[in-house]
Amino acid sequence: MQNLLDMNREIFFNVYEENIMGTQTGTLANDKKMLLRDAEGNPNDTSYLSVVSDKYRVVTNEEILVPLQQQMINFFDPTVLEEVNIQDTLSNNGVVSYCKYTLPRIKHSIETPTGHRTEFGLTFVMKNTFDGKGSVTMWSGLIDFFCTNGTVTGEYDITRKRHSRNFNTDGFISAFEMSMEKHKAAVDQYQVYADTKINSTLKVQQLFDKLTNTNRAEQKRSGGLSDKLFAQWIDEVQERGSNVFSVQSALTHYGSHDDDRFALTKAGDGATLYKRSEQVTKWLSSNVWKNFVEDLSVAA
């Protein structure tokens, strides 16, 4: 629990606002302001973040994370928080900030027909930006402890709040409370996925083609994202069996791994994996995915 009370983490940097003025003419930009951050709490050591509208409401990471952490302390038994894992990721000097909390003691298991058992723990991810391009976002979902797959389970697990004058954290606190109920329900859904067999590899390839907007008839060579997802699914089948759960695992693997198959580009960083997870969330919430699952359930 000491980690939850540690305010010396880099993610808790301060953000300062300054007027923007032309260096040669002295002209003031009336509708813009510049955002700066400090280094290790030192206001005399600042660096540039972005230029935003003068109406932009700065929401510091501390303003979001401290209430969430306090909610965890109030909600969970201290033994649960003894093993909480906190992972902070700052991209572009903190212009985009992510904080991920994983609670390994809050877990449920599913088992595939092959006898493979997977444990899922509860995780929360908070995203904040300081460039005027995104809302404050919280994901609450599951993490696969077998291979630390992605954490997202669907659109209903996402809460967003704009950087507006009326910003508050009430919606995130409510989402946190609701996630406790949805956690077990999501695992139950995963068990249904594990019990739903797949007898057609073509259907899986067609699913990946649709999700990635791959036109197989026009594709001149293999090796695109759809083909990589299909190859990952083949690997997942070896452990989890040929079922819907293994397909989902292939998708979440893409959203959480920097490996030979899904390597980050030179410009990529930890935030890239979170962006992939956002894409996986959209895929798993799409009608394409829902129709895929329903068709297999009917066939079964």
Image (cartoon, rainbow, N blue to C red):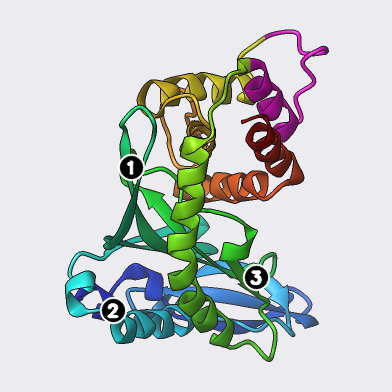
Tell me if mark 3 has few (under 14), some (14-19) or many (20+) residues whose alpha carbon lies within 10 angstroms of its own.
some
Q: Which mark is residue 135?
A: 3
| Secondary structure beneath label 3 | loop
**At which x and y percent is residue 58?**
60, 82
Indicate the amino acid at tag 3. Ser
**At which x and y percent is residue 237?**
44, 23
Q: Which residue is mark 2?
A: 76
Q: Quadrant of residue 257?
A: top left
Indicate the amino acid at tag 2. Phe
Q: Which residue is mark 1?
A: 118
Q: Quadrant of residue 213?
A: top right
Magenta residues (range): 202-221
Nearest-to-viewer mark from 3 and 2:
2
Position above or below: 298 against 198: below
How far, Cα to Cα, is label 1 from label 3? 33 Å
Q: Is residue 163 visible?
A: yes
**At which x and y percent is residue 182?**
49, 66
Indicate the amino acid at tag 1. Thr
